[in-house]
Image (tube, rainbow, N blue to C red):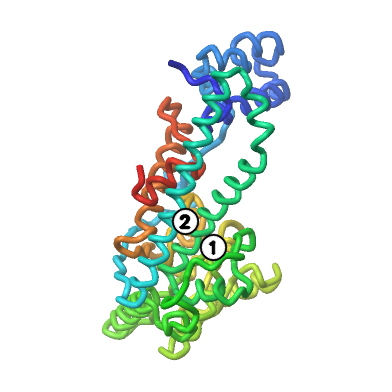
Amino acid sequence: MRDTSFGTPRLMLLFLLAELAPIIVGLLQLSPFDDVKVWKHWIGTKAVLKGSEERLHTIGKALILRRTKEEVSSMSPDAGIILPKYIEEIEVTLSESENQVYTYLFDYAKSVMRQFLKAQKDRQDELQNAANNYVAGAIRRGNKKNETAKDARFSQILCLCVRLRQLAVLPFLIKTMLDDDDVDESDCDTSYNPLDDPINAKNPVFEPGFKSAKIRKVLEELHKLKLVAEEKGQLMDKVIIVSQWTSFLDILAQHLRKKGFSYDSLDGRLKVQERTEVMNKFNGNPKRPQVLLLSITAGGVGLNLTGANHVYFIEPQWNLQIERQAQDRVHRFGQTKPVYIKRFICQSSFEQRVMEIQQVKKELANNLVNNSKKTRSAGLNVMDLKNLFDLA
């Protein structure tokens, strides 16, 4: 049975393209499709609903200019050579104290998810009964408060997902929630406290000086890189360390200073001119700084960081494209060394499930570009959450 709803990402994209493409086609005077009547008959919105989206994909691919770096390099030798990129996943194991807090919070989040699913099922049963009694509209109007409550509960689950991701990076990021301080995700509801005694803000793992499993592993990898350079009598390759949370990068900076690594920071707190100065300093001096601490929101576009050839991703993002944009700040024309990407992933944690969602979104993007009919929601939906908490 063909899905004709507007809710699937593929159809939403198709309808958007069906509305915008005629304008482009008209400007380019691509006969006969620059005629509105011809367009609507063969490719317009109604044609999409009738299952003729292949035509829309065909003309869409003709209008979209998409060239990879490798294609540009092969077509134009003057552009330069793109050196290889190697991606490695570094396994990280939480310490016993970190795992204790993580397990407690995960179990709590899982129980909240179960309550949400039960409330959702009860709501569906209620609507079905109402429909059977021909009073569905009245029932809906009479339960608006319940719907609002369930929306808040869904937001609570999403917030707990953020906390689990933070906990896999550095427990101190959770302490900011316990202390009701400012946190990176301002849209999260922090009016409740899921961490009761004996897990509380007095736990040593929540102190800013606590060296988390991620920090230990990052310092270990940096030390290996430094030893290799010393053995060869060369300067250490420069490293960019990327994270979503600037508060983590600030704490990591303290550990880098103690270990004797020179570093600089580039994040949203810097003005545009200051970012340019940091970038030029990092690329221009082969000795210092050895490490650049980069906020992933600031490292998406507009930066050339070819002074480094190692990129460390502290945590996986929901959308793999965000990570790829940060990689491309280093792996681009002008890079003179092979690029090494390392992704630090906590084993048996929420991060592994995030990577599974990354893979699904990657396949969705490839299918849309390659005119494939395989589709799946691009957003984080209830089914994704069920998988995240092993409730599918």
- Camera-near label (1 vs 2) is 2
Kindly identify the residue that appears in the image at 47 percent across and 36 percent down: 121
Note whether residue 77 is visible: no
The image quarter containing residue 29 is top right
**Position of 5 compared to 365: left or right?**
right
Badges 1 and 2: C-beta atoms under 8 Å apart? yes
Front residue of 172 and 313: 172
Q: Judging from the image, what secondary structure is the residue with disc 1 in?
A: loop
The image quarter containing residue 215 is bottom left
| Above-or-below relation of 317 to 61 | below
List x then y, in percent, for residue 317.
47, 56
Q: Amino acid at mark 1?
A: Ile
Q: Judging from the image, what secondary structure is the residue with disc 2 in?
A: loop
> What is the CA distance from the residue labelled 1 to the residue labelled 2?
9 Å
List x then y, in percent, for residue 309.
42, 67
Q: Earlier in the sequence, mark 1 or mark 2?
A: 1
Kindly identify the residue that appears in the image at 73 percent across and 24 percent down: 27
| Above-or-below relation of 130 to 301 | above
Kindly identify the residue that appears in the image at 45 percent across and 62 percent down: 165
Q: Amino acid at mark 2?
A: Gln
| Above-or-below relation of 92 to 373 | below
Pointer 1 residue: 296
**Position of 345 compared to 154: left or right?**
left
Residue 317's disc number: 2
Disc 2 packing (10 Å; few <14; some 14–19; many ≥20)? some
